[in-house]
Amino acid sequence: MEKLQAQVLIIGAGPSGMVAAGYLENNGVDCLVVEKNSFPRFSIGESLLPKSMENFKEAGLLEALKAAGFQKKYGARFIKAGRVGEFDFSEKFGEGWNWTWQAPRADFDMVLADEVQRKGVKIYFNAEVQQVDFKEKTVLTKILANQEKEIEIKANFIIDASGNGRVLANQLNLNSSPKITGNSSIFTHIKETNRPKGKEGELITFEVLDTKTWFWYIPFSNGNTSLGFVGNNSWFSSFSDNNSEAFTAMLEKLDYYKTRFNEYPFLFEPIKLPNIAKGVKKIYGKNYALTGNSAEFLDPIFSSGVAFATESGLKAAKLVKLEIAGEKVNWEQDYARYMENGISVFSTYVKEWYTGNLQKLFFHETPRTEIKEQICAVLAGYVWNKENPFVRNHKRIIQNIAFLIDSESVNL
């Protein structure tokens, strides 16, 4: 058995793991990455938030991403029964990035992995974690590379960025009920050879079928387009068990996009993910931290997945660097509570989306400018800025304004 050693072992070469690896390498911390799959590989989570741009920059990965030419995302559009709620990131509350990307993750993640390897970090692809043993001051991890070669890795710390693989959550029995329950998703790609010019063919759009059900349209710069539906499990059960037949029937339920995609074959059999939300009991422990989807996943409605992945990956890497340098780190305060603050804000927005309260704000005919700017900042991922009332008072402000909108309707 081959034996390796590193200060930090990172499980997973997605955005969370690559941001962590980039930051650690930049700061002189020896790290090693193991990735279960070969790259490029398909992954969902194709829409980013501007907050992620700060994390890519600090990890030294931003310039490589810029050079790749991915479709820039300047905002998002929501459509329901003829009403439109459009958000421009340049018109948000507070400071921060005004754009980001929407991109096929196979290509996007490949750029990140290539850049991290160019910096000198070793990534073992096709390497599956078989066992993790936590000792007093070290962690021993056994992996199987290319389904045949056994490798033992000794590290001071593990950052688990394994996403849906949920390596440590499964091994340490950390899985718990998610904050959002009962939703499933189905998605595919098409080659949109006759895509409209301008905003209609560039802007990420969500068509809302009803309060609980919605469709996404995400155009990429390579001419492909991601299409998907999210709804509760009971809605999905009303369609065929054949995913292609089900997806075709779902497209017929659309209003704004109905018939637009009829001429395009699916580039792959639509993939269905039941019960998409995930949760854990805790996101750190002695000599380990969970980041990205390996810790928490809420719902794709506000594209928060990669934002939380990069934020948690960078935050964990910073704390690991301090700990390895001999400094005392308060993981509860500086990691668990920090991440929970942001997750709590987005959890409120997701829950109030599905109650319909947030949709009342999105589709109000005459929204107040300052309210729309404050909501836009949340949609851009700036969920830690407590100067924003829609962050600071998130648990009640949406309900209160939805109540006022209802009262306004009664008065009319």
Image (cartoon, helix red, strand yellow):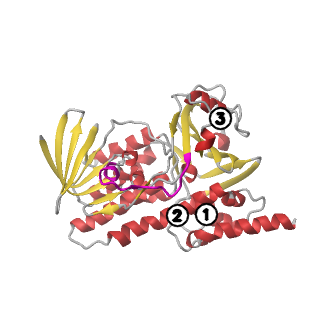
Determine the secondary structure under disc 1: loop
Q: Which residue is mark 1?
A: 92
**Residue at image location 19% in from the left, 55% down from the top:** 155
Horizontally, is 49 left or right of 13 in the view?
right
> Looking at the image, is mark 2 or mark 1 nearer the viewer?
2
Magenta stretch bounds: 167-183
Q: Is residue 202 visible?
A: no
The residue labelled by disc 2 is 382
Tag 3 or tag 2, which sits nearer the N-term?
3
At horizontal 67% and vertical 50% (from top left) the residue drawn is: 78
The amino acid at mark 1 is Lys
Q: Earlier in the sequence, mark 2 or mark 1?
A: 1
Give the side of residue 15 with respect to residue 358, left or right.
left
- Amino acid type at circle 2 is Tyr
Q: Quadrant of residue 234?
A: top right
Q: Amino acid at mark 3?
A: Met
- Marks 2/3: CA distance? 33 Å
Q: Is residue 158 visible?
A: yes
In the image, is residue 395 above or below residue 221? below
- The 10 Å Cα crowd at callout 2, few under 14, some 14 to 19, many 20 or more, is many
Closer to the camera, 365 or 70? 365
Residue 298, given in percent of the width and then of the height, sits at 51, 54
State the CA–CA distance, disc 3 to disc 1: 34 Å
Instruction: Tell me the tag on residue 250.
Output: 3
Disc marking residue 176: none
- Determine whether label 2 and label 1 are within 8 Å by CB: yes
